[in-house]
Structure formats: structure tokens, C-alpha cells
Amino acid sequence: MTTTRRDGVTAHPDGIQLVLGESVVFHDSDGNVLTAAVRGDDDGPATVVLTVEGDALTVTPRTARALAAALTGIANTAEIVECLPV
């Protein structure tokens, strides 16, 4: 099930869901700009373009899902470690 927020971003239970031609911009707590976009043309399959402060990485949708899962796991681990007493 998806929901659409007032700002037009479609939220999916697993995170943001984009369709071909859409993009979403995030700002982290340090002011970095992160962009995710789904691109496609008539000659090939869709690709996911991830941009962090101007450096872009273009991957297949499957690779983007794996990357998102890996980054989520890393971030969750970092948050757990941050909460542990030294």
C-alpha cells in the first residue's frame, strides 16, 4: 500500500517509491544533498541514478535495491553502536 503526502512524494512501506522520470531530493543533517531518480529511454531498461553532492552512481533497479538494503543495515548498525556505552 502506498500513500501520497501533501508535497506529492509517494511513500511506500519500504521507503520512497519512484516512477520513471521522477526524482526525490534529501538533505542530511550535515547539509549534504542526496538525489535519487529513475531514468529510462527508448533504447534500454530503466536505471536508478543516485547523486551525493554532485557525484553520480547509475545502477540497475536490482542493484539499487541491494544498495539501499546494505546502506540501511549499515546505518542501523551505526545507530545501535552509537547508543552503546563505552
Image (cartoon, rainbow, N blue to C red):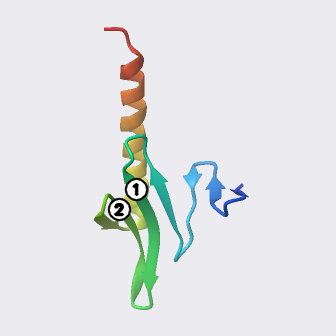
65 and 30: which is toward the camera = 30
Q: Quadrant of residue 49?
A: bottom left
Image vertical order of residue 74 relative to residue 49, above or below? above
Query: What amino acid is at disc 2?
Result: Thr
State if disc 2 and disc 1 touch (CB < 8 Å).
yes
Image vertical order of residue 34 relative to residue 71, above or below? below
Query: Residue 67 vs residue 22: left or right?
Result: left
Q: Residue drawn 63% across and 61% down?
A: 9
The x and y percentages for residue 75 are 39, 36
Q: Which residue is mark 2?
A: 51
Q: Earlier in the sequence, mark 1 or mark 2?
A: 1
Query: Residue 46 vs residue 16: left or right?
Result: left
Q: Secondary structure at mark 2?
A: strand
The x and y percentages for residue 4 are 71, 59
Q: Residues within 10 Å of mark 1 (few under 14, many from 20)?
A: some
43 and 57: which is toward the camera = 57
Q: Residue drawn 39% across and 55% down?
A: 33
Q: Which residue is mark 1?
A: 34
Q: Please state, as top left, top right, bottom left or bottom right, where the C terminus lies in the image.
A: top left
The x and y percentages for residue 10 are 64, 60
Q: Residues within 10 Å of mark 2 (few under 14, many from 20)?
A: some
Residue placed furthest toward the top? 86
3 and 62: which is toward the camera = 3
21 and 7: which is toward the camera = 7
The x and y percentages for residue 15 are 56, 50
Query: What amino acid is at disc 1?
Result: Leu
Q: Secondary structure at mark 1?
A: strand
Q: Quadrant of residue 57?
A: bottom left
Q: Residue drawn 63% across and 48% down?
A: 13
